[in-house]
Image: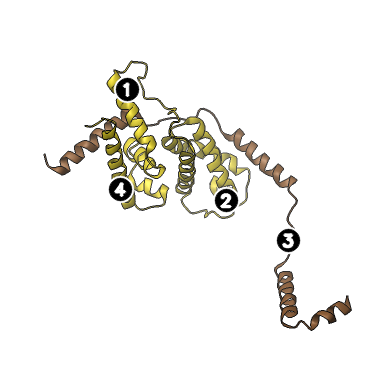
C-alpha cells in the first residue's frame, strides 16, 4: 500500500470514529426564541432611556473651536484682547 | 417586497417574521459547531440581534443567509474559545443506552479529548467538514477564508488529531 492510499485509509478511519463519537447534530429548535429576542429589544430600549443622550455638536462648531484654538496658539497677543472683551 | 427588504427599509414589524423565518436555520448551523443546544439558542438570539442592530448597514440585495452564517460562526468560535475543553458534550451519540465495551469507551473518550484540545479554528473545520459533511465552499464562506485555506486547516487538524490519538494509544 503506498503512502497516499494509507493516508486516505487513516483519514477515512478517523472520520468514521469521529462520527461515532460526535454524531452529526440534526438538532431542531426546541421552541420559539422570539420571546427572548423581545426581552433583548426591551432591555436595549430601557438602556437607551436610562442613558443620557449624548450632546450633538455640529461639525462647524468644532471647526470654529479649532480655528480659535489655532489663532490663540499662533497669535498669543490675541489673548489679552479677548480677555479684555470678556 | 420580502421580509428582509421590508425590515431594511425601516419596517420594525417585519423583524418578527424575519426572526421566525431564520431562527431555525441559524440554530442548526450553530449547534453543529458548538454541539450544545442551550449555548446554540443563546448564540442564535445574539446572531439575530446583530442583524437587528445592523439594519442601517446591510445591503438589501446581499446574501443575508451568508451574512448570518458568518456572524454565527464568529460567535460560535468565540464561544468555543471561552468554553473549557473539559465541558461535556451535550449531544450524545445515538444508541448510548447499549453498553459499550471498555475499549470502545476508552477510544471514544480519547477521540473526544483530542477534538476538544484542537484550537477552535481547526475544531470548527473538523466538525463542519468531517462530521457534518458541509462543502468546503460553505465552510470557507462562513469563516471568511478561501476553500484552499479550509483544506489546509483540515489537513493540519487531521495531522494533530492523529498525533494526539497515537499518544493516547488509539491508531487505525
Count neighbours of disc 3 (C-alpha within 10 A) and say few if under 14, some if 14 to 19, many if 20 or more: few
Dot 2 falls on which chain? B
- SS at circle 3: loop
Q: Position of residue B109 (x, y in %)?
A: 34, 27
Q: Quadrant of the C terminus of chain A?
A: bottom right
Figure check: B112 above or below A1: above
- SS at circle 4: helix
Name the foreground residue: A32 vs B3.
A32
- Which circle, 1 or 2, is nearer the viewer? 1
Chain ID, brown in image: A
Residue depicted at x 26% and y 34%: B166
Instruction: Give the image quarter of residue A65.
Output: bottom right
Mark nearer the N terminus (2 vs 4)? 2
Are discs 2 and 4 less than 8 Å apart at CB?
no
Are discs 4 and 1 less than 8 Å apart at CB?
no
Q: Residue beneath label 4, please?
A: B151
Are discs 1 and 2 less than 8 Å apart at CB?
no
Q: Residue beneath label 3, please?
A: A56
Q: Residue beneath label 1, please?
A: B105
Q: CA distance from mark 4 to mark 1?
A: 30 Å
Q: Residue furthest left?
A: A1
Q: CA distance from mark 1 to mark 2?
A: 46 Å
Q: Residue beneath label 2, please?
A: B54
Amino acid at each position: 500500500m503506498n503512502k497516499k492510499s494509507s493516508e486516505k485509509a487513516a483519514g477515512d478511519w478517523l472520520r468514521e470514529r469521529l462520527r461515532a463519537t460526535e454524531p452529526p447534530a440534526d438538532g431542531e429548535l426546541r421552541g420559539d426564541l422570539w420571546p427572548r429576542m423581545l426581552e433583548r429589544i426591551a432591555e436595549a430600549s430601557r438602556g437607551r432611556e436610562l442613558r443620557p443622550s449624548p450632546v450633538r455638536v455640529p461639525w462647524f462648531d468644532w471647526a470654529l473651536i479649532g480655528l480659535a484654538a489655532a489663532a490663540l496658539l499662533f497669535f498669543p497677543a490675541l489673548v489679552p484682547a479677548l480677555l479684555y472683551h470678556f | 417586497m420580502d421580509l428582509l427588504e421590508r425590515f431594511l427599509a425601516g419596517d420594525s414589524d417585519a423583524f418578527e417574521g424575519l426572526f421566525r423565518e431564520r431562527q431555525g436555520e441559524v440554530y442548526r448551523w450553530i449547534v453543529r459547531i458548538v454541539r450544545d443546544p442551550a449555548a446554540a439558542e443563546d448564540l442564535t438570539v445574539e446572531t439575530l440581534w446583530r442583524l437587528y442592530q445592523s439594519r442601517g448597514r446591510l445591503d438589501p440585495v446581499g446574501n443575508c443567509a451568508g451574512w448570518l452564517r458568518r456572524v454565527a460562526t464568529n460567535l460560535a468560535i468565540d464561544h468555543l474559545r471561552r468554553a473549557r475543553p473539559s465541558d461535556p458534550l451535550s449531544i450524545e451519540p445515538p444508541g448510548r443506552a447499549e453498553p459499550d465495551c471498555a475499549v470502545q469507551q476508552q477510544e471514544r473518550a480519547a477521540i473526544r479529548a483530542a477534538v476538544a484540545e484542537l484550537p477552535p479554528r481547526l475544531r470548527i473545520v473538523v466538525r463542519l467538514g468531517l462530521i457534518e459533511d458541509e462543502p468546503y465552499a460553505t465552510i470557507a464562506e462562513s469563516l471568511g477564508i478561501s476553500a484552499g485555506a479550509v483544506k489546509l486547516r483540515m489537513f493540519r487538524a487531521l495531522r494533530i488529531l492523529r498525533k494526539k490519538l497515537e499518544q493516547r494509544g488509539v491508531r487505525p
